[in-house]
Image: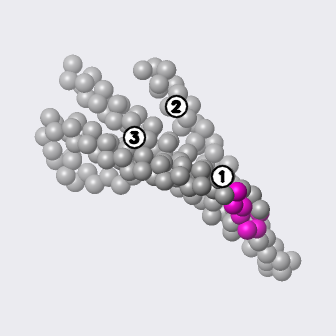
């Protein structure tokens, strides 16, 4: 369990670093493009393509980190907080399973898209980069979400066991 926790902490650290770098990239590209349009009267045509793709990565990695902290992307605890203690663990396991199923579907369709883009050799319009690079952000984010949902559920279940002792 300690090795798993070390791995998950390392993964979360990498996710946070990627989030900071990509956020700064979006900030620089967006501000730079606005400055370029207003001062030089030329638009950086590649920024929209790159910013949209990177925003997908940011969204999915942030959702994965939220899953690590809260155990779900959207958490309606109005019902689960009022459950008797003996039903909290089964409800958390059910919620985790449903979140993992959703993330697995997202992972599968993301991988299907990546494979299709690899086979077709399709490239982006402006940057002329292979589209699979940007589509790979979807299964990467979904995979991180799956790992963090499992981590949260294990932490939740083992925390309850420790409190019972």
Q: CA distance from mark 2 to mark 3?
A: 14 Å
Q: Which residue is mark 3?
A: 149
Q: Which mark is residue 9?
A: 2
Residue at numbered disc 1: 118
Earlier residue among tags 2 and 1: 2
The x, y position of residue 132, in whole percent, is: 65, 53
Residue 22, position as x, y percentages in the image? 66, 52
First in residue order: circle 2 vs circle 3: 2
Is residue 88 a member of the stretch shown in magenta? no
Specify whether 80 is left or right of 18. left
Label 2 crowding class (10 Å Cα cut-off): few <14, some 14-19, many 20+?
Answer: few
| Magenta span main SS | loop
Q: CA distance from mark 2 to mark 1?
A: 32 Å
Q: SS class of the residue under badge 2? A: helix
Q: Residues within 10 Å of mark 1 (few under 14, many from 20)?
A: some
Residue 74 coordinates in the image, percent (x, y)? 35, 55
């Amino acid at each position: 369990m300690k090795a798993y926790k070390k791995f998950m902490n390392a993964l979360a650290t990498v996710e946070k670093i990627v989030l900071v770098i990509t956020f700064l990239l979006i900030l620089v590209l967006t501000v730079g493009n606005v400055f370029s349009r207003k001062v030089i009267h030329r638009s950086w045509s590649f920024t929209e393509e790159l910013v949209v793709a990177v925003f997908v990565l940011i969204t999915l990695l942030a959702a994965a980190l939220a899953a690590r902290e809260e155990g779900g992307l959207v958490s309606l605890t109005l019902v689960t907080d009022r459950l008797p203690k003996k039903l909290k663990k089964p409800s958390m396991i059910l919620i985790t399973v449903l979140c993992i199923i959703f993330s697995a579907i997202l992972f599968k369709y993301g991988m299907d898209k990546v494979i299709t883009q690899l086979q077709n050799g399709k490239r982006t319009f402006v940057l002329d980069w292979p589209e699979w690079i940007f589509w790979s952000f979807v299964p990467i984010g979904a995979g991180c979400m799956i790992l963090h949902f499992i981590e949260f559920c294990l932490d939740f279940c083992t925390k309850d066991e420790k409190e019972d002792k």
